[in-house]
Amino acid sequence: MFIKLNLNAPLHLDSSSRLHILSAVSYLLALTATYWAYSQGFSGPFHFDDTPNLAALAQANDWINRLAFVFSGAAGPLERPVALATFLIDQPSWPDEPSTFLRNNVLIHLLNGSLVVWCLFRLS
């Protein structure tokens, strides 16, 4: 009933499989390098329009106030409700810990970039 694996047997991969593995490893290295590069700024402060755009985050303690925060943006014609919704993740850290905002922002961007790459691979 046991499956016996021979770990000493050579692993034969076709060129397509090698290319997929190389692409995946390269992409993971690029993600890691990008995270590392941006992590150098995680100890920085809030900048530019962060404080006026996020000031209402302090009152976003219940669902009504959270919805009001998300749909009350004034940054451009579309008011950026998706962007404001992502700031709710860091609401407990407002305004004392900009590092959590910066780290989560980088992670969200890396995730979105990964979704774009995944879609491009699926299309090809």
Image (cartoon, rainbow, N blue to C red):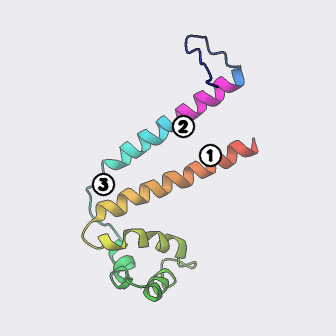
Name the residue type under label 1: Val
Which labelled disc corresponds to residue 117? 1
User: To which residue does mark 2 refer?
Assistant: 27
- The prevailing secondary structure element of the residues shown in magenta is helix
Q: CA distance from mark 3 to mark 2?
A: 23 Å
Looking at the image, residue 43 sits to the left or right of residue 1; the answer is: left
Q: Does the magenta-highlighted stretch encompass residue 120?
A: no
Q: Earlier in the sequence, mark 1 or mark 2?
A: 2
Q: Earlier in the sequence, mark 3 or mark 2?
A: 2
Residue depicted at 52% across the width and 83% down the height: 71
Numbered range of the magenta stretch: 17-27
Q: Is residue 92 above or below residue 107?
A: below
Q: What amino acid type is highlighted by mark number 3?
A: Phe
What residue would you read off at disc 3? 42
Cα separation between marks 1 and 3: 25 Å
| Vertical comparison of 6 with 70: above or below | above
> Which element is circle 1 on?
helix
Question: Does dot 3 land on a helix, a strand or a loop?
Answer: loop
Residue 25 location (% of width, % of height): 53, 32
* Residue 79, x across and y down, in percent: 53, 79
Work out whether 64 lies above or below 77.
below
The correct choice, above or below, for 7 with respect to 76 in the image is: above
Numbered disc total: 3
